[in-house]
Image (tube, rainbow, N blue to C red):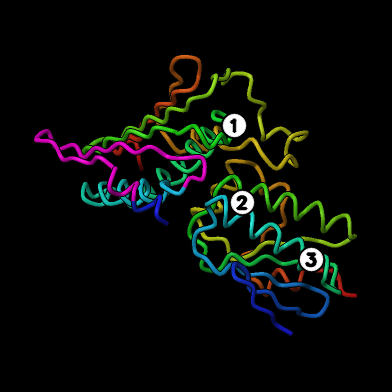
Amino acid sequence: MASETPRLRCSSQGSVLVVEFADRDVLDDVAIRQINSELVRQIEAAKTVHVLICFRGVEHLSSAALGTLITVNSLVKKRSGQLRLSNIKGTILEVFRITKLDRLFQIHDTSEQALAAFPKS
Amino acid sequence: MRAACRALNDHMMSTSNTGFDSGNVNVSASAEELEVLQTSVASALTRHAYGEHALFSIRLAIEEAVMNAIRHGNLSDPAKTVEARWSVGAESATFHIIDQGEGFDPAAVPDPTLDENLEIPSGRGLMLIRAYMHEVRHHGLGNHLEMTFRREAVA
């Protein structure tokens, strides 16, 4: 069951809510606020507990977007789920490394690898 | 949208005989003019043949500097603006981001990479600016940030 929201594309794969960004830049405040509220709404409405955020097509990311990911991580953990990230291009991966957030998040090269790493329910 | 068009009209841009492109734009609390600033800077960088990583680095640093100035400098006061002055030459690109706030002590900003701060959602802007630009200076009370990207420093 897939649903379209303006900033995100969400679908369910087994016990995992899979989220992709509709925009190539996840930078500006208005967009990030929308993404934040859409993500929280989708996660709270989802029957699944785990979340995969796929960065396919994303070219830019700001610290405000990192803040949203941290908020989402806390929310998912509170629901006893896991958040995994995938398909992050090199320049953006560098942002995760510089901020040491690659230690906080579970990052996979591909969404297939990420999906395989979630616990089987 | 109207504000963005006005920003484009107000955005003073020039190309000097010395080979520098420069510009000056005032960004309001809604940050609508930020995209105009980013587009103008990216065009100038492309004209001077800066690479993709330079464009990525500078776009990120401008985003972080202007948003910090709006949020933490001007406290999102709609009556206040952030002045962004930029200059792009063959060897370096320099940016001045000036807010109308009371300034701050850059040394007092907590290190967001420490384990105890890793899960705090904010406070990473300044460290990203320092990581991606080659020179970062704070003038006055701290409400004037100057940052420079040097092309030859890129591997």
* Residue B70: image location, x then y, percent: 53, 35
Looking at the rendered structure, whether the residues under marks 3 and 1 are on a common chain is answered as no
Quadrant of the rendering where the N terminus of chain B is positioned: bottom left
Q: Which mark is residue B75?
A: 1
Report in which chain the residue with disc 2 lies: A
Q: Amino acid at mark 1?
A: Leu
Task: Specify whether residue B14 is painted magenta.
Answer: yes
* Residue A82: image location, x then y, percent: 81, 61
Which badge, 2 or 3, comes first in the chain's sequence? 3
Q: Secondary structure at mark 2?
A: helix
**In the image, residue B1 above or below residue A53:** above
Q: Amino acid at mark 2?
A: Ala
Q: Which quadrant of the view contains residue B144?
A: top left
Residue neighbourhood size for the residue with mark 3, other residues' Cα within 10 Å, grouped as few (<14), some (14–19), many (≥20): many
Whether residue B90 is visible, yes or no, is no
Q: Secondary structure at mark 1?
A: loop
Does the CB distance between marks 3 and 1 fall below 8 Å? no
Which is more toward the observer, A67 or A82? A67
Question: Which residue was labeled with disc 2?
Answer: A65
State the residue lying farthest toward the bottom: A1
Question: Which residue was labeled with disc 3?
Answer: A43
